[in-house]
Amino acid sequence: MIYNIEYETMPREAIEAIQLKRLKATLDNVYATVPFYKEKFKEAGMEPSDIKTLKDLSKVPFTVKQDLRDNYPYGMFAVPMNNVVRIHASSGTTGSPTVVGYTKRDIKTWSELMARSLAAGGATPGDIIHNAYGYGLFTGGLGVHYGAEELGASVIPVSGGNTKRQIVIMKDFGPTILTATPSYTLHLAEVANDMGIDFKDLNFKFGIFGAEPWSETMRQDIQNKLGITACDIYGLSEVMGPGVAIECFEAQKGLHVFEDHFIAEIIDPETEEVLPYGEMGELVFTSITKEAFPIIRYRTRDITSLSVEPCICGRTHVRMNKVSGRTDDMLIIRGVNVFPSQIESVLMKSNEIAPHYQLIVDREGNLDNLTVKVEIDEAHFADEVKQLQNLSNKISHNIKEYLGVSAKVKLVEPKSIARSEGKAVRVIDNRKL
Ligand code: DLL
């Protein structure tokens, strides 16, 4: 085994014993150091000493994004600022950004977890990692960077953007692993193609993609176009950044949560009840080793389910299914709930279209209208108008059949939808204007 995975293959009882010990210490710590948590716990009529088993965690109140905003910027830090060595923040497209901090030990923990993640996704110390996640306040770039160095791999800190130059670097430097968002990866493949370079002729073996939802069909498309094995990596700034969970390259089925550092729960987003393994709901995380920014029962708004089925890779940590979307990205079209990634799955079944799309939602009177804007593939752009009309009818029919939602499908010219260099903007909801 390339990286020591002792913690990842322990019997469940041993993992849970570690979790309970670390959870108790974390609750004691936040109660003593973060006034927000002390007040919350008191309001809920509980004290850290009430938590005697892992099941008791359900007695602890949730933390939500608004709590972080109310305590902007440093109100939820558990250490004095002179112990904080790094600050990251979410983009904050709505409201003020959420700010998170790390001590030296937190950076060490994160680097180790990212090294473990990269190793699970197929990386070895001999690899060269082309890291096209954005560097900056976003956690993707620096998270992968420190993990790659911790593993002993070589990292090319290329960040997002300047796409043509990235292709030249890929050709000349011979990277073996690509790390990027899935949407930017498709853009890279497209630009390489325009430059007369086939990704399959490059040196890549593995790709480690995440930071946004992507469907199973999108994975197949990326694997075919790039000639690599593509694994899904999950994380969020509030909990740490990338490296909270990752698929192993052996199974590529479900993301192993690093349970020696985080406790995952699934709740019903309406009733807030904890749901059993296998049921879909909102993912909730508690950190159990962080110093600067411990987080307790954080409601991620991400929708998935958990499983403890044994994995062929030998890891015993709980696995989360691919995230299907966020509760706040879920579209309710005439009463039907639908995630952009579900529409993506249907779109990707048609060979005549390119994997670039956008969903536009409008309200006419009291009715919601969904328009799916999707690019025609270069090879089919010159098709007869009649053929294209049939194609858009077929896609519209498939969306209705698979998802129960009526959508108008608008086929647009190749390369007319804006490309992302980070997270793709899939939905334009004009109802919110
Ligand atoms: O996106 C951290 C990250 C960087 C993860 C690089 C993976 C790779 P934030 O910007 O705080 O952090 O956004 C977190 O992105 O709550 C999910 O909604 C979404 N997300 C992250 N990874 C995945 C994934 C980073 N693999 C938010 N699948 C999360 C689906 C994902 N959604």
Image (spheres, rainbow, N blue to C red):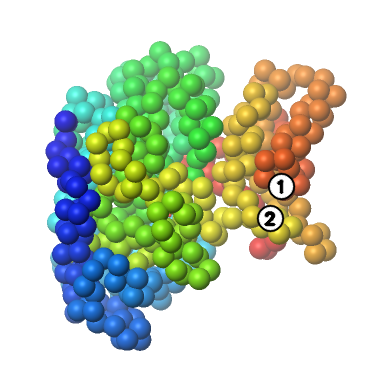
Query: Which residue occupies 79% across, 60% down?
Result: 367
**C-alpha separation, residue under disc 1 versus residue under disc 2:** 7 Å
Indicate the quadrant containing the C terminus: top left, top right, bottom left or bottom right: bottom right
The residue lying toward the viewer, choosing from 429 and 89, is 429
Tag of residue 336: 2
Ligand 1 within 8 A of label 1's CB? Answer: no
The residue lying toward the viewer, choosing from 218 and 47, is 47
Indicate the quadrant containing the N terminus: top left, top right, bottom left or bottom right: top left
Compare marks 1 and 2 and give the one earlier in the sequence. 2
Q: Position of residue 172 (x, y in %)?
A: 33, 18
Query: Which residue occupies 24% across, 82% down?
Result: 47
Residue 183 visible somewhere in the drawing: no
Residue at label 1? 404
Badge count: 2
- Residue 91 relative to residue 337: left or right: left
Residue 43 lies, with reference to residue 252, above or below; the image says below
Which three-letter amino acid code belongs to the residue tagged 1? Answer: Gly
Query: Could you tell me which secondary element the residue under label 2 belongs to?
Result: strand
Tag of residue 72: none
User: Crowding at label 1, few (<14), some or many (≥20) Cα neighbours within 10 Å?
Assistant: some
Q: Position of residue 279 (x, y in %)?
A: 47, 54
User: Which corner quadrant of the image does residue 97 belong to?
Assistant: bottom left
Query: Which residue occupies 16% across, 53% down?
Result: 14
- Residue 100 relative to residue 347: left or right: left
Residue 422 lies, with reference to residue 164, above or below; the image says below
Which three-letter amino acid code belongs to the residue tagged 2? Answer: Val
Residue 31 lies, with reference to residue 405, above or below; the image says below
Task: Confirm or deny contact between disc 1 and disc 2 (CB under 8 A).
Answer: yes
Q: Position of residue 114 (x, y in %)?
A: 25, 43
Q: Position of residue 271 (x, y in %)?
A: 50, 71
Query: Could you tell me which secondary element the residue under label 1 belongs to?
Result: loop
